[in-house]
Image (cartoon, coloured by chain):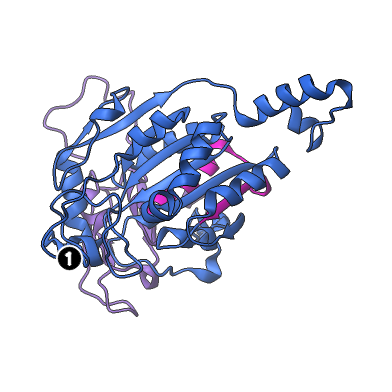
Chain colours: A purple, B blue
Amino acid sequence: MKFWRTPLDADKIKVPHGETYVIKERCKGCGFCVEFCPKRALRLSDEFNIKGYHPPEMIGKDECVNCGLCEMICPEFAIYCLEEEEVQVEG
Amino acid sequence: MITKEHPMTPLLRMDRIPHIWCPTCGIGTAVSCFAAALKQNEIPLEKVAIVSGIGCTGRVAGYMKVDSFHTTHGRAIPFATGLKLARPEMKIVVFSGDGDLFAIGGNHFIHAARRNMDLTVICVNNFIYGMTGGQLAPTTPLSAKSTTSPYGNYEHPFNLPHLAASCGATYVARWTALHIRRLTNSMSEALNKKGFSFIEVIAPCSTVYARRNRLGSGLDLMKFYHDNCEIKNGANPEEADIGFQSKIIVGKFVDKEKPSFIDNMHVGLKRALGDKYIPYGGDDGAK
């Protein structure tokens, strides 16, 4: 993550890191997650799903902070985030 | 293995997903927030029942994996009232649309709020009758176009929080489909609130409301909410009128304590019958 100056408590605060998963077949391409992601970590992809919509994809691997906004705002229950560490433990 | 499962899966009837709501409709977001509120409170799912009426939002009862009932048009609140009186230990939620709750079932709403029935009413307000083809609803703002008002609406719309508050509801809030965290917190407060709690969720309707009024898609309406909503907790609901594409006042308007219908019923019957009175529903009923 980039800062315009190093925060004073940078050593104490740990920025959470998440991974976003998209269930592509359920997406109806509304773009809510893309528009309102606070980190602008998503974009509509060029690929088509089975319904003919463009499901979202992550722009970079490091941007997601696991805030869960996309998971809550998605009207199709098609996107969710998991904390990165959690995934590694399970994997 | 990574669990490739959506966290809402245990709360939804996955065999019915994908749902029928249009792309950029806000009802799915309201359902998502409600599921999150249930999860947040760790309420056992067998202790919750959802009652819906007819309409787009009326389909919510079919998608949530709790006891649910899809009633006749406008009759969600009477059904929920009966359910609450028969099973006082359950949390009964009425999840329905503005047309169902305020046009066809308007009288039921008024009287349930007057009695202070122990219900949580969530009204998804999209300003129009969506499922039947975009007719004028009692919440359609002045000058908005609909199928039955092609030259613009000239009827005054309902101000739903004001109506609920003036009828005696103990908890009144209004949020939009964009205020997901506040809406979730409000829903969990309403679930734990004794008495009649009412939450209005303003949701975009892309296919009829936005298209008839040339407002773009539901995403454009969400951007509009982002720019034009004003959070005013504790504001007078009388001033929370909604005009066509005007500023929307959102927030928690009323949060007060008042004996509910069941409390009053126990007191009244105990006074009349004395020791002969046995509360229905066992000990839970007397609480």
Q: Is residue A84 something that shows in the picture?
A: no
Depth check: give the residue in front, A51 or B241. Answer: B241
Displayed quadrant of residue B41: top right
The percent position of residue A29, horizontal first and vertical second, equals: 27, 67
Q: Residues within 10 Å of mark 1 (few under 14, many from 20)?
A: some
The residue under label 1 is: B211
Decide: is A24 above or below B223: below
Predominant SS of the magenta segment? helix
Dividing the picture into quarters, in which one does residue B251 lie? Answer: top left
Residue B95: x and y in percent read 48, 50
Q: In x, y percent, where is residue A46?
A: 20, 73
Looking at the rendered image, the quarter that the C terminus of chain B falls into is top right
Is A47 left or right of B199, judged from the image as shown? left
In the shown orientation, is residue A40 left or right of residue B167? left
Does the segment drawn in magenta span residue B37?
yes
Residue placed at 24% from the left, 67% from the top? B207
- The kind of residue on which mark 1 rests is Arg
Is residue A91 or residue B222 the one in the foreground? B222
Residue extending farthest to the front is B272
Which residue does the image show at 38% across and 62% down from the upper left? A76
Residue B240, placed above or below residue A30: above
Residue B41 against residue A55 in the figure, above or below: above
Is residue B199 a member of the stretch shown in magenta? no
Residue B113 appears in the figure: yes
Residue B78, above or below B64: above
Residue at (71, 23) in percent of width and height: B268
Estimate the x, y position of residue B33 in percent, counting from the top left. Answer: 42, 46
* Horizontal relation, residue B39 to residue B33: left or right: right
Q: Which residue range is magenta in the image?
A: B29-52
Identify the element where label 1 is drawn: helix
**Nearer to us in this view, B244 or B23:** B244
